[in-house]
Image: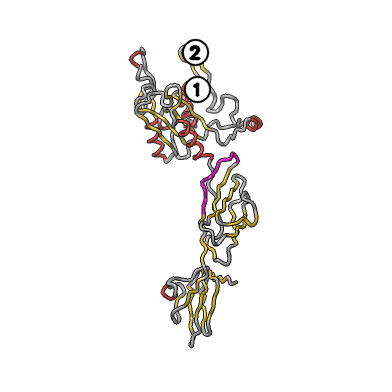
């Protein structure tokens, strides 16, 4: 599929998201596809030679079989049912393919930890001398030490058929596999909602936008407001909030090209009445709460009133303070001293 784009398109294969898995020998194949990624890690037998009277040919390289040597055959993620690896050294970094594993402690065919395969029947096999392999419990420990993403479902009484419950599958197998692939690789990240959340009763119109990209598409939901412009699938919309609505919220879900949905981004909307906040003292500092009649520094829906003063009254706004208020009434002999970098916005009716 990587070598033949037309076939990939025909069968709708995303070659950047190919996953692999299996049970027992199939799990061995999947795990070694994921973690045998260097020429010196190839099994000795793949370099050719004479074995038990038969001539075996050098397979050339890890990806030579099939002739697509320009395309990496390593998968992106793996599931393993009762699998193991030849050596834990194959797992090398957090950038290796991630893995979800299922294994039972009473598995006598493939070791849960370290051991020789087929230990449950080794007494009946003359000359049994299979290599030591390393099962899921040790793969988990090695992956954790590398900070390699993994999930391990451990059991005590499922034997080698860890997925088989008689003629059916255990109920946790398919969700365990599909949820892992979905959340690790297919689920898009939530997009940020950009726009105000605090409004004054007399000014309830707002524009919201989110990231405009080629890999995700938005779906907006509005509670307690009316969509004024744009559609619920646009990246930019305008909303008018309803002051009397008991609940006001804007939320966003992002979808990618395969229809996978992100977690929901939410913002609760607050509508504040116009409140008068009076300056209480002579000269002083704007950002000190005790200087104001409401007991706090003025906010965007407040009318600031500084009465007439019989002598020069100076209110200092410290450097880089950001202020947004609704109205500003300064009496005679009152001055604002805005230090460097101050943002001072007044939105009057």
Q: Position of residue 198 (x, y in %)?
A: 52, 62
| Residue 341 in view | no
303 or 109: nearer the viewer: 303
Q: Is residue 164 above or below residue 177?
A: above
Q: How would you rate the neighbour count of disc 2 (Cα within 10 Å): few for under 14, some for 14-19, many for 20 or more?
A: few
Is 332 colored magenta in this rendering?
A: no
4 or 242: nearer the viewer: 242
Q: Position of residue 23 (x, y in %)?
A: 45, 25
Q: Position of residue 160 (x, y in %)?
A: 39, 23
Determine the residue positioned at 35% across, 19% down: 120
Q: How would you rate the neighbour count of disc 1 (Cα within 10 Å): few for under 14, some for 14-19, many for 20 or more?
A: some
**Position of residue 102 in the picture relative to residue 189 (left or right):** left
Question: What number is the disc on residue 54?
Answer: 2
Mark 1 or mark 2, earlier in chain: 1
Q: Position of residue 237 (x, y in %)?
A: 62, 55
Q: Is residue 203 above or below residue 55?
A: below
Give, as a single range, the part of the protein colored magenta.
Answer: 257-266
Question: What number is the disc on residue 47?
Answer: 1
Residue 241, quarter of the rendered image:
bottom right
């Amino acid at each position: 599929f990587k070598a033949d784009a037309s076939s990939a398109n025909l069968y709708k294969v995303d070659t950047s998201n190919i996953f692999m898995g299996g049970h027992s020998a199939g799990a061995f194949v999947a795990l070694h596809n994921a973690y045998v990624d260097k020429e010196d890690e190839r099994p000795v037998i793949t370099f050719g030679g004479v074995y038990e009277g038969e001539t075996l040919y050098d397979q050339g390289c890890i990806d030579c079989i099939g002739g697509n040597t320009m395309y990496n055959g390593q998968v992106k993620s793996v599931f393993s049912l009762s699998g193991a690896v030849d050596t834990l050294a194959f797992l090398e970094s957090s950038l290796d393919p991630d893995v979800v594993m299922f294994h039972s402690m009473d598995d006598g065919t493939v070791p849960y930890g370290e051991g020789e395969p087929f230990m449950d029947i080794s007494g009946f096999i003359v000359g049994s001398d299979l290599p030591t392999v390393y099962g899921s419990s040790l793969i988990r420990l090695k992956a954790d030490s590398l900070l390699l993403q993994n999930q391990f479902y451990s059991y005590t009484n499922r034997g080698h058929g860890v997925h088989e419950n008689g003629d059916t599958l255990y109920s946790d197998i398919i969700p365990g596999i599909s949820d892992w692939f979905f959340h690790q690789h297919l689920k898009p990240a939530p997009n940020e909602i950009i726009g105000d959340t605090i409004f004054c009763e007399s000014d309830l119109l707002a524009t919201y936008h989110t990231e405009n990209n080629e890999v995700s598409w938005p779906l907006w939901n509005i509670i307690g407001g009316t969509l004024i412009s744009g559609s619920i699938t646009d990246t930019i919309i305008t909303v008018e909030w309803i002051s009397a609505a008991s609940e006001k919220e804007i939320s966003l879900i992002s979808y990618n090209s395969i229809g996978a949905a992100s977690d929901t981004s939410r913002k609760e909307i607050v509508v504040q009445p116009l409140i008068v906040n009076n300056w209480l003292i002579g000269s002083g500092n704007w950002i000190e709460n005790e200087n104001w009649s409401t007991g706090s520094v003025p906010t965007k829906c407040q009318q600031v009133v500084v009465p007439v003063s019989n002598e020069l009254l100076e209110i200092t706004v410290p450097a880089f303070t950001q202020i947004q208020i609704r109205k500003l009434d300064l009496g005679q002999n009152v001055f604002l001293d805005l230090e460097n970098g101050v943002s001072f916005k007044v939105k009057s009716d």
